[in-house]
Amino acid sequence: MTSSAPAPSSDASEIPRVAPTFQLSSRGLLLAFCVMIGVGLSVYALFPESIGGPPLPVVVTLDEAPLPTTDGQMAVLTQVVTVTSELDEPIGHLTIILNGRYEITQASPLQPGESVTLPQAIFTDKRSNRRFDPETQVVTEVMVRGQLPSKSRGVSKFFFESPSDE
């Protein structure tokens, strides 16, 4: 009877074994990608002004101004936000944000020295599309973002005291 035991092998005929290497599965790759995006968005949410860019040369004022009604027959005194450019070139992609929550984006560039006056009531909440109500809310912060001539995004933030703080 023959035995089926393996024959002793010599060192020269032995196949070298390599330690197993770490391989990332498609699920692991997707998870790593999601974590990177989550960390980036978290940093932006916690420190938006540090990521914003250079200051935008504008002046912001809060006031009341007579604005025409929708039928154009008369003007009504309304709470407004006025943004005036102090730059010698147009500012594109202008976005104005009230209290870090209500925003509006102007389609046309803000020309040098030009002012845009917008009623506070037309600003909408980024999350719920609810409008800003100047009768019940007070503007304490206005952030203005826009594209500078260098194609970088400029950001300026303005703080205002509420009437109860005076």
Image (tube, rainbow, N blue to C red):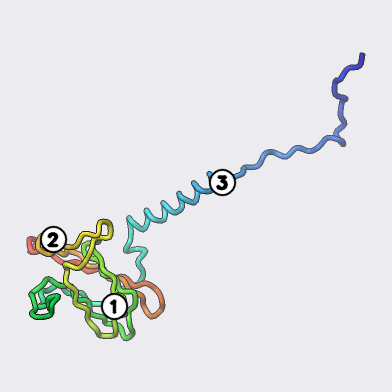
- Of the pair 115 and 160, the residue shown nearer to us: 115
Q: Which residue is mark 3?
A: 26
In the rendered image, residue 89, in percent from the top left (x then y), is placed at 33, 85
Q: Which residue is mark 2?
A: 137
Q: Element under label 1?
A: loop
Q: Are marks 3 and 1 in contact (CB under 8 Å)?
A: no
Residue lying at the far right of the rendered structure: 1
Q: Residue at x 33, y 83 (%)?
A: 90
Q: Element under label 2?
A: loop
- Of the pair 86 and 70, the residue shown nearer to us: 70
Mark 3 or 2, nearer chain start: 3
Q: Residue at x 20, y 65 (%)?
A: 141
In the rendered image, residue 165, in percent from the top left (x then y), is placed at 9, 61
From mark 3 to mark 1, how far is it between C-alphas? 47 Å
Q: Which residue is mark 1?
A: 57
Q: Residue at x 16, y 64 (%)?
A: 139
